[in-house]
Amino acid sequence: MEELNGKKLVIGVIGADVHAVGIRILDYAFRGAGFEVTNLGVMVSQEEFIGAAVETNADAIIVSSLYGHGELDCRGLREKCDEAGLTGILLYVGGNIVVGKQDFEDVEKRFRAMGFDRVFPPGTSPEEAIQMLNQDLEVE
Amino acid sequence: MRPVLLIDFGSTYTKATAVDLDQEVILGTSPAFTTSDSDIGEGLTHALDRLCEKTGVLDYTARLACSSAAGGLRMMVSGLVPELTAQAAKLAALGAGAKICRVFSHGLSRRDLEEIQADPPDIFLLTGGTDGGNRECIIGNAEKLATLTVRFPIILAGNRNAVDDCEDFLSEFPVTLCPNVMPHFGELDIEPVQREIRKLFLSRIVSARGLSKTQELLSGILMPTPSAILSAMVLLAGGTDREPGLGDLMAIDVGGATTDVYSIGWGEPDDINIILKGFEEPYAKRTVEGDIGVRYSAQGIVNETGLSQIACQAEVTEDQVQALLLELTCDKSLVARKCGDAIGRLDDALAAGAVDIATRRHAGTLSEVYTVTGVVPVQTGKNLRRIRRIILTGGPLIHADDPLAIARRALFSDSCPMSLRPLHAEILMDSQYILSAMGVLAEREPDVALRIMKKELVRLGECRATDGDRRVAGPNIK
């Protein structure tokens, strides 16, 4: 385990999604990269993401979704964050976040419009996400 | 013979219990009205006189007591997110036997502060933020509390990276520092806070309440009454090194103003495929329903159960129920004159409603979530389905016509199938009101207290949620 970099993440699989393996891999990878991780596991509601981020004073919320309903589940998360005082918190989303095979550029545009700072396509490696986090959170 | 005197200062009754440690028997019990308005010692003297009539003069080797007189241990708690640290703080205070007047979440408002100033608590539990997490909330609240002119003990049990700043603001208050009630997200650490509440109760509250006037009579008031009952239940469930316990159990205490439910057990899911949501619940959990009781809070039961159902159960008309409730509002000491009269039947219906509502609020729930991979069961709170023993205490249950029928309302029911209440259970009755006394005795003589409970709790029978009950006679558990 590397030294802690002082940045805190809240991660979880949103909605009624029970894919338990990927989030553990992310948990492991993020911790290895020096982040302090609060892993909410599977079937996480927007309210749980927000409650955890408020209490832990998180720097970013990382939303994972693999079952295709991500678009419905993620709607309104940014607005609820604003409401809860988490103004400007970094929001990431990744996985199989939409139904079927869609053009990813379109998908990314839609999720960005919903307030997500970064949107990751299927098959993204944890390293790519870590690199982006380091950049966005200005980890030295 | 080694007689010990155990006293429970209640808000209505002072109960004295004499126990012989050598024979491990109850020598006698006696209640008398509490006189907290004047001198609490007066009620005690009455209780002791009546006890003396039953047992003769005894040379007690120890006098121990618990108390919920003069309003009990009044606490306010504050946290950040209502479902997280504020809830953890609430669980901590309830488990320590406190009566919670207010739960604050997020920042305290001016109105909140006015309320605290007008009617300050015995203890304030200040929490918020996981360790290393949010600092602003708890520090902000400490700064605001510092502007008050009243003083009360504050237990500081929040984000460890914020407590120094809080302490600086609260330098004029008696502050006790404790580990965070939620050090990491979803993880509870409430026992240190509970120990501290107990210490403060002894060192400050007892003397402030005029309870210490009776001090020369007692070797010490040890704890608030609900905390004594909780200790008795933990002992009865877990046993000691030398004496086995009964295993996981529940206890229900229906009173005039509130209904308390206790559950001892981890309450884990029955099945590996059930997904557990929410944070871990305490092994020994106490909940208090302030709006559910058969006298002061009778309306709360009627509101939730429905007037027609209460009337149907009490075998009276709805108008009669309302008339009786009005009568009860005017005279709280009204009790059934003869077995089976209208007040008695209404009391039983209210007690049944209280048991139903309070256990539903206490127990966890199961829900089904439809996912692309099929239906997934999700559990929140404690799973009490496998609990096989329920202990009943409190006047309305002890004096009920058919306590077994009332106890059945604590079980699984078709009308509320997702509530994780027991499927079937053996029902035990605290017919001599000894639970709080045994909780106090457990401090000194846990083996004796456990054996006396096993002897004295009356076995009423086996209740089943589905088919009929099996009644048994005989007081012994084994």
Image (cartoon, coloured by chain):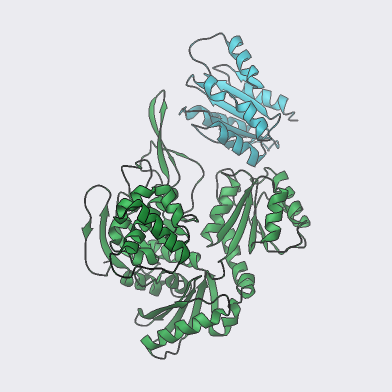
Residue beneath the point at 42% across and 57% down: B264
Camera sees residue B297: yes
Residue B63 x %, y %: 49, 81
Q: In the depicted view, which residue is nearer to us: A15 or B287? A: B287
Left or right of B90? Residue B466 is left
Q: Position of residue A131 (x, y in %)?
A: 67, 23
Q: Quadrant of residue B333?
A: bottom left
Count of numbered badges drawn on the protein: 0
Classify B196 as above or below B34. above
Side of B230 relative to B116 (left or right): left
Above or below for A85 versus B112: above
Q: Residue at x 45, y 90 (%)?
A: B59
State which chain is coloured cyan: A
State whether residue A60 appears in this view.
Answer: no
Image quarter hosting the C terminus of chain B? bottom left
Who is closer to the viewer here, B433 or A136? B433
Q: Position of residue B42 (x, y in %)?
A: 53, 82
Image colour assigned to chain B:
green
Task: Identify the residue at horizontal 61%, vertical 18% (top origin).
Answer: A111
Left or right of B304 on screen, residue A62: right
Task: Please tell me which residue is depicted at 73% across the width and 30% down the height of the picture.
Answer: A139
Q: Which quadrant of the view contains residue B460?
A: bottom left
Location of residue B430 in the rendering, given as x and y in whole percent from the top left corner: 35, 68
Q: Give the quadrant of the N terminus of chain B.
A: bottom left
